[in-house]
Image (tube, helix red, strand yellow):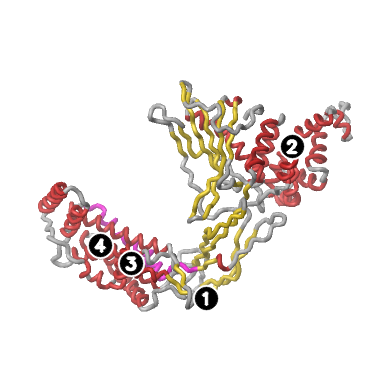
């Protein structure tokens, strides 16, 4: 940025559209950031950057806020640069050089971590010929829990940027600001030694700027200033008086005469740079002085920028915010008896922890975000977990109250019962092995239709499995119905004297007529399919038998009743979500803890899928371990019948 041009309010001043030597381009950068503009806020300015051969640029900075179920959540910092360049490549190469210092300033003003700003997309702003260059870097948007952070006053950001672009020593101050930014990124419990290292480098960069300002303010020479600090400047045997003056100015001005903090910071820096101290010793010194060093370096930068007194005082009062050290720690007891408390296939007993946003409350410019903690117990079936307390560890800012988590914010639940999980997990490997055994066989038109129908059944099974894992067993009924209908069709195909693959051809014929396509097209396509089937000696039944007459459908009659309600959106399944609080109150729960209902739908899916596989293996000539298939179906039947005898509704 030019030191002679200050930001202007006009967003388009000096911006052109397209000419012979280039065009207008927009480049967008994003950074993870705990410094946040308010949802209605942001900042816009125009700058000139002749040192990198760029015409006036318009820069906009704002925080990307998302609406999560009517809750406003802050995400990345966005810096958008628009201006003229000879090509998209030049814009992508040069515009970030102007955008990144803005992100740096945002972090400094808020005194909180801002990550590296990277290009996420760029494009030609105007399409002069009906086409425009476009580039996008695919980086996943932020999701999940919102880390701690703070908002800031835009007028403070504007004042700092204007002052920085007008100050004589802005290159040296700019280097200090970048190291201050790196210190904020390392500001966490255990990272004090790295943060201090960057702060010391920042202090060294500031030293000559501070000396020049003192000389300009007091109208004395550098030698006179050195003599005021007790240094000899005219002895040829002691030529390093300028280095010694720098050290004394750092100690007396930048560190404000705080000898113990200065010496601890210097010792840690020297120990790290020259390798004369073990890291634990470096860390010990850093922990003792890093927070004060942050304050002194920040004050030195603010003083060099010659900001208005009121803004300078407010900026100096903002302490660095540690947004990385927050840790939630659960304490409790594993209950029950088992030689190994871990779940089968797991190395250790553990809780699968997820944190979501429960509510967001805004008070002025402050946002209070309340989280909901969900812990899923992953242990041996005979081992339970009893929660005793959930604590929050981290670095407290001055005057900040410890973070507390109430019982209402915690949900502890078990995974679907292990017996069901084992059954569900056993299905896909068996299916994959069977299908692979027939990989070399060629298909006719009819057998291919049947194979695709089998694939549809498998997709329905995996949908049921995923919904159960997501604690949505009621929603799994519709997919269970699809699976059972496919299994019924294969049962009909495989029946002695049955239609075999001809039934799959009839399914295809019915599907064509059901698409609502042109009647002539439907008739022609159906004729083609029938002709091919006839040529391959495939007998196509004139109609489809009712799947409700099949053994598999009748054996899962209860599940199919629920599925009918679920598929039609009928109220019959709504009660499965309702948990009564007391005689007067009841609550609707979208997600349901594992219980008889989960066992019912999950075991039914296993029965239907393995029954489907048994019929399909006979039709396609696949190899399958029928003894194992029979054992798994028997286990699933036992679990299914047991679940059907229990209360399927959520417990009070």
- Compared across the picture, whether 229 is left or right of 3 comes to right
Q: Residue at x 65, y 57 (%)?
A: 394
Mark 1: few/some/many CA within 10 Å (<14, 14-19, 20+): few
SS at badge 3 = loop
Q: Is residue 447 something that shows in the picture? A: no
Sequence-first disc among 2 and 1:
2
SS at badge 1 = loop
- Compared across the picture, whether 127 is left or right of 445 comes to right
Q: Position of residue 231 (x, y in %)?
A: 87, 33
Residue that label 1 marks: 336
Q: Residue at x 32, y 58 (%)?
A: 459
Residue that label 3 marks: 570
Select label 1 or label 3 by which is in front: 3
Q: Residue at x 10, y 53 (%)?
A: 534
Q: Position of residue 634 (x, y in %)?
A: 31, 73
Look at the picture and state if 143 lies above or below 177.
Answer: below
Sequence-first disc among 1 and 3:
1
Q: Nearer the viewer, residue 179 or 581?
A: 581
SS at badge 2 = helix
Residue 432 within the magenta-colored segment of the rendering:
yes
Residue that label 4 marks: 486
Prevalent SS, magenta region:
helix
Image quarter of residue 456: bottom left
- Compared across the picture, whether 564 is left or right of 496 comes to right
Select label 4 or label 1 by which is in front: 4
Measured Cα–Cα span from mark 2 to mark 3: 72 Å
Measured Cα–Cα span from mark 3 to mark 4: 23 Å
Q: Nearer the viewer, residue 261 or 588?
A: 588
Residue 429 within the magenta-colored segment of the rendering:
yes
Sequence-first disc among 4 and 1:
1
Label placed on residue 204: 2
Magenta range is: 413-441
């Amino acid at each position: 940025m030019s030191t002679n041009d200050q930001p202007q309010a006009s967003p388009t001043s000096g911006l052109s559209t397209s000419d012979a030597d280039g065009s207008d381009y927009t480049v967008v950068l994003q950074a993870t950031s705990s410094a946040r503009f308010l949802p209605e806020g942001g900042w816009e300015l125009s700058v000139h950057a002749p040192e990198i051969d760029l015409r006036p640029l318009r820069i906009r900075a704002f925080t990307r806020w998302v609406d999560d179920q009517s809750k406003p959540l802050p995400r990345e910092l966005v810096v958008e640069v628009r201006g003229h360049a000879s090509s998209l490549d030049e814009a992508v190469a040069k515009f970030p050089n102007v955008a990144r210092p803005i992100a740096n300033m945002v972090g400094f003003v808020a005194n909180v971590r801002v990550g590296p700003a990277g290009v996420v997309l760029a494009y030609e702003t105007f399409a002069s010929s009906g086409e425009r260059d476009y580039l996008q870097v695919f980086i996943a948007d932020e999701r999940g829990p919102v880390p701690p952070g703070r908002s800031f006053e835009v007028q403070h950001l504007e004042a700092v940027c204007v002052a920085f672009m007008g100050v004589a020593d802005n290159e040296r101050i700019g280097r200090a600001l970048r190291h201050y930014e790196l210190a904020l990124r390392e500001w966490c419990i255990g990272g004090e030694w790295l943060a201090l290292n960057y702060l010391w480098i920042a202090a060294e960069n500031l030293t000559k700027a501070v000396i020049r300002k003192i000389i300009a303010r007091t109208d004395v020479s550098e030698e006179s200033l050195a003599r005021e600090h007790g240094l000899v400047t005219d002895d040829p045997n002691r030529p390093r008086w300028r280095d010694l003056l720098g050290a004394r100015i750092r100690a007396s001005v930048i560190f404000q005469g705080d000898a113990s903090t200065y010496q601890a910071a210097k010792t840690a820096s020297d120990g790290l740079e020259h390798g004369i101290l073990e890291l634990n010793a470096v860390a010990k010194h850093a922990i003792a002085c890093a927070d004060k060093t942050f304050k002194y370096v920040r004050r030195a930068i603010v003083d060099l920028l010659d900001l208005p007194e009121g803004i300078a005082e407010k900026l100096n009062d903002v302490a660095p915010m540690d947004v990385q050290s927050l840790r939630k720690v659960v304490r409790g007891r594993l209950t029950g008896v088992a030689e190994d408390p871990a779940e089968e296939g797991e190395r250790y007993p553990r809780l699968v922890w997820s944190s979501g946003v429960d509510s967001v409350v805004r008070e002025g410019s402050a946002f209070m975000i309340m989280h909901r903690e969900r812990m899923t117990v992953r242990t041996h079936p005979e081992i339970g977990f009893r929660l005793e307390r959930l604590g929050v560890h981290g670095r407290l800012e001055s005057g900040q109250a410890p973070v507390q988590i109430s019982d209402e914010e915690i949900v502890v639940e078990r995974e679907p019962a292990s017996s069901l999980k084992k059954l569900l997990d056993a299905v896909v490997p068996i299916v994959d092995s069977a299908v692979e055994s027939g990989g070399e066989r060629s298909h006719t038109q009819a057998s291919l239709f049947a194979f695709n129908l089998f694939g549809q059944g498998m997709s329905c099974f995996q949908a049921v499995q995923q919904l159960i894992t997501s604690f949505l067993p009621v929603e799994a009924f519709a997919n269970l119905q699809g699976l059972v209908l496919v299994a019924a069709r294969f049962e009909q195909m495989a029946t002695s004297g049955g239609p075999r693959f001809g039934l799959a051809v009839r399914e295809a014929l019915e599907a064509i007529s059901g698409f609502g396509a042109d009647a002539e097209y439907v008739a022609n396509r159906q004729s083609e399919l029938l002709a091919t089937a006839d040529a391959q000696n495939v007998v196509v039944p004139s109609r489809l038998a009712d799947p409700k007459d099949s053994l598999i459908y009748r054996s899962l009659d209860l599940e199919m009743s629920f599925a009918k309600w679920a598929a039609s959106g009928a109220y019959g399944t709504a009660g499965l979500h309702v948990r009564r609080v007391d005689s007067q109150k009841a609550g609707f729960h979208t997600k349901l803890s594992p219980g008889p209902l989960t066992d019912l739908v999950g075991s039914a899916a296993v029965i239907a899928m393995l029954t489907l596989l048994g019929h399909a293996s006979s039709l396609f000539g696949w190899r399958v371990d029928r003894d194992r298939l029979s054992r798994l179906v028997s286990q699933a039947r036992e679990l299914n019948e047991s679940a059907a005898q229990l209360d399927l509704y959520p417990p009070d």
